[in-house]
Image (cartoon, coloured by chain):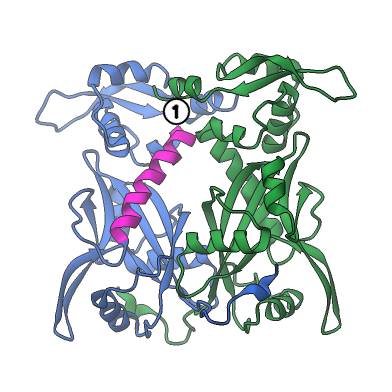
Chain colours: A blue, B green
Amino acid sequence: MTHTELSPARRISDNGISVDCVIFGFDGERLNVLLLRRTGEIGGISFDDMKLPGSPIYQDEDLDEAAHRVLKELTGLSNVYLSQFKAFGSKTRTENPRDVIWLEKESGIKVDRRMVTVAYIALLKIGRSISRELNGSRAIWVPLGTEGSLAFDHNQILTESISQIRRMVALSPDCIFDLLPRKFTISQLRKLYETILQEKIDAGNFYKKLSVMPYVVPLDEKETGTPHRAARLYRFDRVIYRKNHSE
Amino acid sequence: MTHTELSPARRISDNGISVDCVIFGFDGERLNVLLLRRTGEIGGISFDDMKLPGSPIYQDEDLDEAAHRVLKELTGLSNVYLSQFKAFGSKTRTENPRDVIWLEKESGIKVDRRMVTVAYIALLKIGRSISRELNGSRAIWVPLGTEGSLAFDHNQILTESISQIRRMVALSPDCIFDLLPRKFTISQLRKLYETILQEKIDAGNFYKKLSVMPYVVPLDEKETGTPHRAARLYRFDRVIYRKNHSE
């Protein structure tokens, strides 16, 4: 029982490797994902759909390096905390001729084999500084649920990344505040939980839930410039959070 | 800002893909990991160390399929719940000539490039049925901490898989009982927690902790055949657990 059991009748895989970045951003109302549009016509096939920012990796870079490079080159974003969450390696993932034709044209490489992709995830608040970084790139924020049919297996990667956020929030509840502006309303916090948990949360019940979140601290301020009655603003207190989560 | 930004001066990676399985087993006293011994001499280099069960994948199989095949072929184990936890793709991971020589001899493939490996994890109780399945294979249970210097980056994979168990237990406390025999003592449960959390737990404090684990149910039975005073046996009650973890 050694490696010599490898069957000579079956071909060993020499697949390519790529990385894909699933970047989530909350705009105060909705959870968005950062996508690139595929447009134009190649060999009689017309493209008008979207994909995650991703790319084959270079021989001389590590996976994490590749993920940061891809994000910077394709979206302009740097200094983003990316965490690896899963490798996707189905043998059918580069079987769609549309995707093969597109990838060969765009990357200049021959796609004669499966590309195994390693997916990364990041949570961002959509604010002025992020918008400035994205300025000039082809990347666009697309509200979750409106992305339509994406390239390759990117719909599956997106679906699994929502489950990944749910695990991240269950393990480290503070990571949800990476998505919120520095000052937020309880309604924004509740909508964000609803999107991530994919269930409706009753507003009254949610206020009760807040009692076990002493790190969500009310401010002496209200939101401004809203058409409805201005709601109180809150902030996340990391010191209180750490006291609660170090026991 | 498109894929055409790929630099023609840098080589696109066409690395191979492998899978590695980190199988943990608890024997009632210690947490063990399932390893294969590398012995013998190849080209003047002598081998006497260990590695995780792993193998390059075939072109015609998916990652999960490969992980189950590798485990069955190298250890005899089947019907094991394997979960993917991380891809390891450092460009230096197949740079040690020892590992390259060994892998080329054992697998019959030319290792002229990095192998990106996708690591899987499983938690098992070492009991009669597992021992029967392992019978006849070269796989051995090695107590954690005594594995020495492993092949490739397998020490790093092993270290990160302990953190992964910690995350799994934090998310789903029931998975710790996958490691324990059906009837266990509180001392066994405490030792297991100590190993996973990598910290000493005071026995008195641990009894207090049990009060928030109503699903650990005492039996009207004591352990037998021990040199010390026989301790009470407990069992895990999944029905009570589900009631507590569905709210």
Left or right: A136 in relation to A93: left
The residue stretch that appears in magenta: A154-173
Query: Is residue A164 inside the magenta stretch?
Result: yes
Residue B204 shows in this picture: yes
- The residue under label 1 is which amino acid type? Asp
Vertical arrangement, residue A233 with respect to residue A91, above or below: above
Counting from the top left corner in percent of width and height, residue B170 is at 54, 33
Label 1 chain ID: A
Toward the right, the furthest residue is B227
Residue under the point 59% across and 63% down? B70
Q: In which quarter of the image is the N terminus of chain A?
A: bottom right
Q: In which quarter of the image is residue B112?
A: bottom right
Could you tell me if residue B126 is visible in this image?
no
Q: Taking B213 as reference, is B208 left or right?
A: right
Residue B180 on image: x %, y %: 66, 33
Q: Quadrant of the C terminus of chain A?
A: top right
Left or right: residue B133 versus residue B175 is: right
